[in-house]
Image: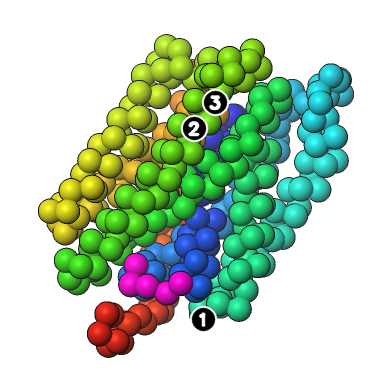
Amino acid sequence: MGAAWLAVTVAWLGWPLGSMALMLVHALTGGRWGAIMYPALRAGIATLPLGLPALAGVMLGAGDLYPWLHPDGGVGLANGFYLNPPAALARAMIYVLAWGVLALVCLRGREPGWIAPAGLIVLGLTYGFAAIDLTESLAPHFSSSAYGLVASAGAVLLASAMGIVLEGARASTADLLRDLARLLLGLTVLWAYLDFMQFLIVWQSNLPAEAAWYGPRLRGGWGMVALCLVGLHFVLPFVLLALPSLQRRRPVVVAVAGLLAGMEVVRNFWLVLPGRPWAQIVLPVLLSLAFFGAGSIFLVLRPGMRAPSVSYRDERGDAHV
């Protein structure tokens, strides 16, 4: 059950935290894309409290997930000073506190421009280390300096895709829709580049501890999932979003955004579930997805949660809402 909770938690966590990152970036840069997606970003951030029961579910099964939590599990680990129960608990408390404060600031009704620079730094550091704690540490001997960056890029991509799915209809002109398509294309390329470079470095190094991380994720049925991720999480979205004629077609842009959001969820399942019996994970994963899905739908549709919108100025200097 712990693996199911962990898989769904890491798949969902990118939405509220990625939404928070996008809102903070928009507070610094402005732009039409943020004005269109602002209600959806607020709704995404509002799902953050769902993480409390999710975190409880992960902690209940942590002993079966993380070998370094066992009394003798940290013996021989070069990073034992980091992977130990007291340090992990302290970091979890820091994550919850930092994310809670930033969420309150982002949801208070005004753009968080005054806290955006520091907020982005805090969010980037905490989410990167949280990704290491939650999924990379499943194999405590595996090490990748890009792991947190890959996870962060995936979270922002997920939040952007969800924002376009929820608010793509508000792009009243072809130029606005093109802005959203180009944003999604750039984030897709960024995520694919970081993830591929991590894989390439591990493949070139050919170290047993690092190769063991990819082994179960590239064999059998999970190997087919990996191929689907290459094709449906990068190649197909890249081709569709790179064509200028399709960037102005609302059904194409929204459909690609939905595909990217779904594949980001599948990718996080691919990180956690390989090596575990299917019979033990299918039902718990479905139940966990139902919990998050129902909770997220309730918060997104809650009256007033997706308001207010923010204004922006077009190329001529005219203000819009």
Residue at numbered disc 1: 110
Which is more N-terminal, label 3 or label 1?
A: 1
- Callout 1 environment at 10 Å: few (<14), some (14 to 19), or many (20+)? few
Write down the region rendered in magenta.
Answer: 29-33
Q: Secondary structure at mark 3?
A: helix
Q: Residue at x 40, y 24 (%)?
A: 226
Residue at numbered disc 2: 197
Which is more N-terminal, label 1 or label 2?
A: 1
Is residue 299 visible in this depiction of the protein?
no
Q: Secondary structure at mark 1?
A: loop
**Which of the 4 quarters of the picture holds residue 130?**
top right
Q: Secondary structure at mark 2?
A: helix
Report the amino acid beneath label 3: Ile
Is residue 44 visible in this depiction of the protein?
yes
- Identify which residue, 140 or 117, lies in the foreground: 117
Q: Position of residue 222 (x, y in %)?
A: 43, 19
Residue at numbered disc 3: 201
Left/right of residue 43 with respect to residue 184 in the rendered view: right
